[in-house]
Amino acid sequence: MAKKSVWSDNRFWQRSAAWVTGFASILLIWLTFDTSVQIAMGTDADLQNGVTKRVPGPTVINYKITYEMSTARGHEVPVIGEKELFFGRDDYSEEEAGALLHLGKLGSQTKNCMNCHTLLGNGAYYAPDLTKAWLDPAWGPEGSMQAMTGKETKEEAMAEFLQHPSTYPTHARMMPNLGITAEEAKGLVAFLKHMSSIDTNGFPRNFGKIKGAVHGK
Ligand code: HEC
């Protein structure tokens, strides 16, 4: 009788399937633990001691956030700088900052920002990516949004826009009024500021508005 080729042997394929499944399961479990550590949120003490975390603690809203090209990593990384005022204060406690972020997160869910925008890779591209919206120069001192909204700070301009977006159209498409209150807007801006401080490995790549960015203008 002719020897059966290994490629047509059922046992070979069964064993291969078992090995591949086993190996992939172990790899996935390991990756899950590795990711949990990487994305664990930092604390106020980390920020005060200059300990870099991919996801800084909520009190990062007390600090200036910028983006810098890292030649070692080949993309931009967020840089947490000096203290800066956020709605007139730079001394939010961990509880206060956490409560603001919580309010913003709930607001982003109830008003379904992801229906039009993308946040950290989730959502739609009908409207601009919000992952780094806080760093969009349009809201900074050289941008047009502060003058347009009649506000003197980035956070106030953004909060004003969020409450009355259709009053300040800047894009080919207009953001509808979503009935966002002043308090909700404050939470949402804190949420956006915190999100911009997250090290997302240079994502989104097409965030070309930041000066000095890879595809920057
Ligand atoms: C129905 C679609 C839609 C929804 C829902 C929506 N937006 Fe928008 N948003 C837009 C559009 C369109 C623009 C661009 C408008 C413009 O520039 O005039 C925009 C612009 C923005 C900007 C300015 C972006 C930048 O980089 O300058 C911010 C910030 C923003 N939206 C936040 C939010 C938040 C927060 C929510 C949820 C609470 C939300 N949006 C929900 C459509 C939407």
Image (cartoon, helix red, strand yellow):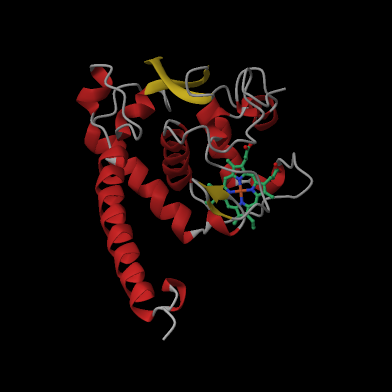
Where residue 62 sits in the image (x, y, percent)? 35, 24
Eyeballing the image, is 114 above or below 79? below
Determine if residue 12 is in view.
yes
Query: Residue, x 66% and y 29% (percent of image)?
Result: 208
Q: Between residue 206 and residue 95, name the one nearer to us.
A: 206
* Quadrant housing residue 90: top left
> Left of 166 or right of it: where is 114?
left
| Residue that protrudes farthest toward the front in the picture | 1
Query: Residue, x 58% and y 59% (percent of image)?
Result: 115
> Left of 15 or right of it: where is 198?
right
Query: Residue, x 57% and y 38% (percent of image)?
Result: 204
* Quadrant housing residue 149: top right
| Residue that protrudes farthest toward the bottom in the picture | 1
Eyeballing the image, is 13 above or below 110? below
| Residue that protrudes farthest toward the left in the picture | 45
* Quadrant housing residue 152: top right
Where residue 32 sits in the image (x, y, percent)? 29, 51
Eyeballing the image, is 111 above or below 84? below
- Dividing the image into 4 quarters, which one contains the N terminus? bottom left
Please count the marks in the image.
Answer: 0
Q: Between residue 67 and residue 27, name the one nearer to us.
A: 27
- Dividing the image into 4 quarters, which one contains the C terminus? top right
Determine if residue 84 is in view.
no
| Residue that protrudes farthest toward the top in the picture | 82
> Left of 48 or right of it: where is 20?
right
Where residue 8 sits in the image (x, y, percent)? 45, 78
Where residue 105 sits in the image (x, y, percent)? 40, 50
